[in-house]
């Protein structure tokens, strides 16, 4: 059977709930035709129109002059319009009911949101860890033009084990970002976050194993990420910051050095600098391309020394950011991180980035100015050696960067950025007057 006939047969199959509305629309069109022919007194063109015309003439005859041809035509046109409208409405409802689950938004709202997101700003976010996935959850509601550049230097937990045993790049932070951008059913995202308990797979996240398996099938992590993106139906895209196996190292204030991301925070010493081994690591071409086309570039939030800075050490990334005409925003963490940023204020974060990467990297610093109020939660953080980051905005301004202070936190279970508040603050920075004009006014 030809493809067109097979497609027509599928539409006419029982149970779709569409045929009755199509028949109603067809009847409405015939009524419209008959009504127009009566009003303008034209000869019918086809046998269907002729049949409707004959019925209309019969109705006029039976009325014995009570109805004029014009008024009968108007009545038929009105009836035809109602039938077409009812048939079209029923058809749309039948299709929408099949495509959208019960209780979801109206189709017109969904279409409007999709159109708005497709036209959204081109945004590149750079970092890793839970901070980056939190940011992506907030931004994905505003634009589909999202690119997440994710660190691949983790050597702990499930990612570290897969890295050592299979020789692949660690997938953990990438998995978190893919899940954050996912549009698939909640069960699928829960599956990717599920961690095995007991046995040989103890501690492994299913999503890590899935990406690792696809890496073996496709031959590289980049292709595996693209295929996983299709499975989860994500908005935007996720790119690893580097395509080769790299070790992160740190030198501490006492001159000692440690290799491996997981070992750096365990050492609990003041970090002097960090670097990559090998030092000359090439980025993916798509990363530099995305940075060059971006309207907004966001660094962080995330661990300063082990998530944000390592991405900037990849060859050409920092230079591409500096040369970009986009708004460039560093999102400062809301809590200090034991073993990395003990006692740091927001200006300390900015100072370290300037010392290790160089000046001119970003135009704005987004800082949380809301003090956490959950005392029990704060006590738990203090027991671990973490405290709220002090928002010393004047000290940031003194470094030649424009600070933006906002209330940005959520205190449910953890003190962290609230995705929607964070996304809204970043979009406000993007839409604000040019940086040069604001700095000149200060």
Image (cartoon, helix red, strand yellow):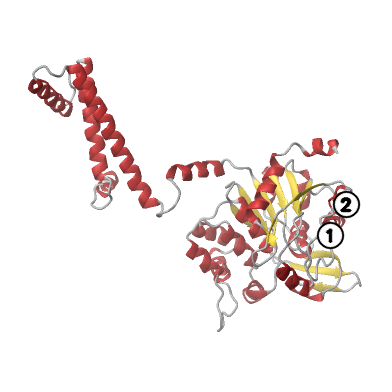
- Rendered-image quadrant of the C terminus: top right
Q: Residue at x 12, y 26 (%)?
A: 55
110 horizontally vs 68: left or right: right
Residue 45: quadrant of the picture = top left
Using a 10 Å C-alpha cutoff, classify the residue at mark 1 as few (fewer than 14 neighbours), some (14 to 19) or many (20 or more): many
Q: Secondary structure at mark 2?
A: helix
Residue found at the very far bottom of the displayed protein: 199
Q: Nearer the viewer, residue 436 or 109?
A: 109
> Which residue corresponds to the image point at 54% horizontal and 67% vertical from the top-left?
192
Residue 102 in sight in this render:
yes
- First in sequence: mark 1 vs mark 2: 1
Residue 329, compared with residue 200, is above or below; it is above
Residue occupying image coordinates x 22% and y 23%? 35
The location of residue 231, given as percent across then percent down, is 49, 60
Residue 91 place in picture, x, y as percent: 31, 43
| Cα separation between marks 1 and 2 | 10 Å
Up-down relation of residue 46 to residue 181 (above or below): above
Specify the label residue 345 is tagged with. Answer: 1
* Residue 285 at least partly seen: no
Q: Which residue is mark 2?
A: 395
* Picture coordinates of residue 306, whole percent (x, y): 76, 65
Q: Please give the name of the residue rendered at 20% of the width and 17% of the height, measured from the top-left corner.
A: 70
The answer to whether 201 is drawn above or below residue 144 in the figure is: below
* Residue 178, percent from left and from top: 58, 60
Label 2 crowd (10 A; few <14 / some 14-19 / many >=20)? some
Cβ atoms under marks 1 and 2 closer than 8 Å = yes
Foreground: 79 or 43? 79
Say whether residue 31 is left or right of residue 130.
left
Query: Which disc, if any, is residue 88?
Result: none
- How many discs appear? 2
The local secondary structure at tag 1 comes to loop
């Amino acid at each position: 059977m030809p493809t067109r006939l097979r497609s027509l047969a599928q539409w006419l199959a029982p149970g779709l709930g569409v045929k009755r509305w199509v028949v109603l629309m067809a009847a409405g069109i015939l009524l419209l035709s008959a009504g127009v022919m009566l009003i303008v007194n034209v000869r019918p063109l086809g046998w269907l129109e002729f049949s409707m015309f004959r019925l209309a003439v019969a109705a006029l005859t039976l009325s014995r002059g009570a109805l004029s041809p014009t008024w009968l035509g108007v009545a038929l046109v009105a009836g035809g319009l109602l039938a077409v409208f009812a048939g079209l409405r029923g058809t749309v409802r039948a299709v929408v009911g099949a495509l959208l689950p019960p209780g979801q938004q109206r189709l017109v709202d969904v279409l409007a949101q999709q159109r708005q997101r497709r036209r959204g700003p081109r945004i590149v976010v750079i970092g890793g860890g839970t901070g980056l996935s939190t940011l992506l959850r907030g931004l994905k509601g505003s634009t589909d033009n999202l690119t997440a550049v994710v660190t691949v230097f983790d050597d702990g937990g499930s990612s570290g084990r897969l890295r050592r045993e299979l020789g692949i790049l660690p997938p953990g932070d990438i998995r978190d970002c893919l899940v954050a951008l996912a549009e698939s059913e909640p069960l699928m995202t829960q599956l990717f976050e599920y961690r095995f308990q007991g046995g040989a797979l103890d501690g492994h996240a299913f999503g890590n194993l899935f990406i690792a398996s696809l890496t073996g099938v496709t031959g590289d992590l980049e292709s595996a990420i693209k295929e996983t993106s299709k499975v989860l139906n994500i908005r935007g895209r996720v790119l690893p910051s580097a395509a080769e196996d790299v070790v992160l190292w740190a030198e501490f204030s006492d001159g000692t050095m440690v290799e491996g991301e997981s070992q750096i925070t365990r050492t609990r010493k003041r970090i002097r600098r960090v670097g990559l081994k090998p030092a000359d690591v090439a980025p993916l071409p798509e990363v530099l391309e995305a940075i060059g086309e971006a309207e907004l570039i966001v660094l962080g939030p995330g661990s300063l020394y082990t998530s944000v800075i390592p991405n900037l050490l990849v060859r050409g990334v920092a230079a591409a950011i500096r040369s970009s005409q986009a708004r460039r925003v560093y999102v400062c963490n809301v809590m200090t991180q034991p073993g990395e940023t003990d006692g740091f204020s927001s200006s300390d974060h900015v100072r370290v980035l300037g010392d290790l990467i160089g000046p001119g990297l970003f135009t704005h610093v987004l800082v949380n100015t809301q003090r956490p109020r959950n005392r029990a939660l704060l006590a738990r953080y203090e027991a671990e050696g973490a405290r709220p980051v002090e928002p010393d905005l004047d000290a940031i301004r003194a470094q030649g960067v424009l600070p933006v202070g906002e209330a940005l936190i959520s205190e449910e279970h953890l003190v962290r950025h609230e995705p929607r508040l964070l996304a809204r603050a970043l979009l406000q920075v993007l839409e604000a007057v040019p940086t040069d004009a604001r700095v000149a006014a200060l």
